Image: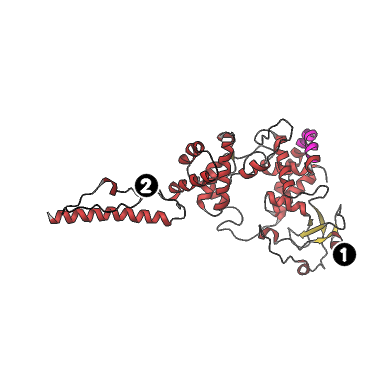
Amino acid sequence: MKRVGTLLLRGVIAVVGTALVSTASAQVDPLAPLPDQSLQPVSPPQTQSMTPVVPQSAIVAPARTGFDAYRQRLAYIARAGGIREQTIAAVVPYLRLNNSAIRLDRGQPGAVGNTSYTPPFEPYRRRHVSADLIRRGQSRYASLWPWLSRVEQRTGVPASVMMAIYGHETSYGAVTGNFDIIEALASLAWEGRRRAMFEREFVSALKLLDMGIPRWRLKGSYAGATGYPQFMPTSVIRLRADGDGDGQAEIWSNQVDGLASIANYLKDAGWKAGVPWGIAVQVPASLDRNAVRNTVTAAECPRVHARHSRPMTMAQWRALGVTPYDRSLPDGETATLIEPDGRGRTAYLLTGNYQAILKYNCSNFYALSVGLLANAIVGR
């Protein structure tokens, strides 16, 4: 009898011990910061019997870990963000981990495992400022001009720049993405590289559901961008605009609303009316690059801004022998210099409006190609 009792006791210790280890593991797992409160260790029963009694409550299921447990965190932050309980119940328990979104995100420049090598700009420019994109942009520009001209007057953002971003982001609406952005955002938040940002965007995506936008509309890129402007959910809520005056801001099916939303984003980012994004210039071989080097580290996207010189006025650049190929900037306009293909090739002086494009997508190649495509659409 004593041996039987000893064996049973060892069994209880093994079961409870395993549960405690699992629970402790879940508690320290950063992906499960809010463990299920129903999975707490149970105090051993008080009994005088030599043969221990194992209550049902002492047999604890292993604690959930990984993405399974992370759903608890998502539900918590959704409630904290004011999302309706009905929305949380309809979405969060059914979320699945999207490994494709994680794999694509990790493959981006500057992501985990990437080198710091920056290729030349010219091959990228040929792909993204192609004859086809220019031709289709010009056609769309002409057909939508009556609406775009009003948006341009209202925001100060040139219609050509709106159109260039539209073409770059979605090939003029042809490719807007097929990822369920709610699932993609939850997956990227769980992955953790930029958790705070993706959790914020996840809650905003749920807010869009609360605002009456159907789940089937919320399709987009692996990173959570959606609609013609490829806005993240926070930008959809804050910056989508009604371009045609019908009282709606329908960025998923209305091109004019999508383009007006792009303009609204750039205006919010500080776009200055009447100033070009930048100009092409020739840099003399005698220029001392070290003397114009920017010694200030940018708070956002430091690698992108590290390729720019320090800001100087057009008059100062001209005094150093930097000369425009075509149009110039006013003498007092401040600009930074970038040589994307190295010395001896076309360089650019970039204004504050270029910085606004960088806020849309913080990549020099992206912003340069948008500016050059915009120029080509209007024949510059």
Three-letter code for the amino acid on which mark 1 is drawn: Ala
Q: Can you give x and y, in whole percent of width and height, for residue 147 in the image?
A: 78, 34
Residue 214 visible in the picture: yes
Q: Can you give x and y, in whole percent of width and height, for residue 253 in the image?
A: 66, 33
Distance of label 1 from label 2 (alpha carbons):
73 Å
* Residue in view at x 38 percent, y 56 percent: 24
What count of labels does the image hold? 2
Tell whether 180 sits left or right of 38: right
Label annotation for residue 319? 1
Q: Is residue 160 magenta?
A: no
Q: Place residue 378 in its image quadrant.
A: top right
Magenta part of the chain: 138-152
* Disc 2 element: helix
Q: Can you give x and y, in whole percent of width and height, for residue 379 in the image?
A: 83, 43
**Contact flag, marks 1 and 2 (Cβ < 8 Å):** no
Q: Residue furthest top?
A: 246
| The N terminus: image quadrant | bottom left
Tell whether 44 sits left or right of 93: left
Residue, disc 2: 38
Q: Can you give x and y, in whole percent of width and height, for residue 214 in the image?
A: 57, 33
Tell whether 84 sits left or right of 335: left
Q: Is residue 11 above or below residue 283?
A: above
* Disc 1 element: helix
Q: Earlier in the sequence, mark 1 or mark 2?
A: 2
Residue placed most toward the observer, 371 or 79: 79
